[in-house]
Amino acid sequence: MTDSSTLNAFVAIVRRDLLLAYRHRAELINPLAFFVLVVTLFPLGVGAEVELLKRIAPGVIWVAALLASLLTMDSLFRSDFEDGSLELMVMSPHPLSVLVLGKVTAHWLLSGAPLSLVAPLLAMMFNMDAEAIKILLLTLLLGTPVLSLIGAIAVALTVGLRKGGVLLAILVLPLYVPVLIFASNAVDAAMAGFPVSGQLYMMSAMLFLAITLTPWPTAAALKMSLS
């Protein structure tokens, strides 16, 4: 099998998932609306003190993004499992890991990318300065793909279960903690005027490792769930 045919299969999977999502546009708004609601409710709950809001902003935005990403994670392979197209993917002559990476890419474009673009607007509500907002956006662009890639493994393990949402959260949330720690710490450091290169390098390394390593266990978990 040639590299070009594998690349074409990857692009076809991404295009297919984006097209299916476009046909159900109303469902795309749910995670974004959840993200905006959670972030905007925090100032109402903790008060309007400017310094307090500024201090908690990185953690609030990142926790909301993490939960919004988890909200859409169960649908990553669910519809394919229910209509039988997942079995066709497994039997495809193309490497299943490449097809999995295509589906995760589409998932991030539909969930992680919109959250990353909306987050700077919400950060202004917390009175964050321009440099901190820039670092926040950068951490989201580096971290949300890692959330999708790690979550894909847990989704593949639970796709055959009728009510795997709770189990999915139990499996995934502990693995999300390192991303949350480094991302929020980077924004905190930027707000305090400290260098953030160490945190960004670590998040870049996590993204590289996730792209390199997670498609194979996800593919193996899908085969196991279908067997």
Image (cartoon, grey):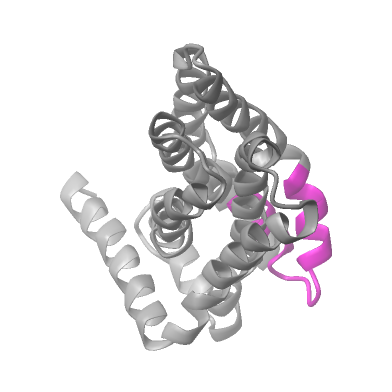
**Relative horizontal placement of residue 10, taking residue 119 as reference (left or right):** left
Magenta span contains residue 172: yes
Q: Nearer the viewer, residue 170 or 198?
A: 198
Q: Is residue 6 visible?
A: yes
Q: Residue at x 43, y 48 (%)?
A: 120
Q: Tell me the quarter of the image containing the C terminus.
A: bottom right
**Relative horizontal placement of residue 2, taking residue 62 as reference (left or right):** left
Q: Residue 200, position in %: x, y?
A: 46, 22
Q: Residue 139, position in %: x, y?
A: 47, 35
**Relative horizontal placement of residue 183, taking residue 132 as reference (left or right):** right
Q: Residue 221, position in %: x, y?
A: 65, 53
In the picture shown, does residue 134 fall above or below 60? above
Magenta-colored span = 152-173
- From the image, give the main secondary structure of the stretch colored magenta: helix
Q: Residue furthest front?
A: 49
Q: Residue 67, position in %: x, y?
A: 67, 56
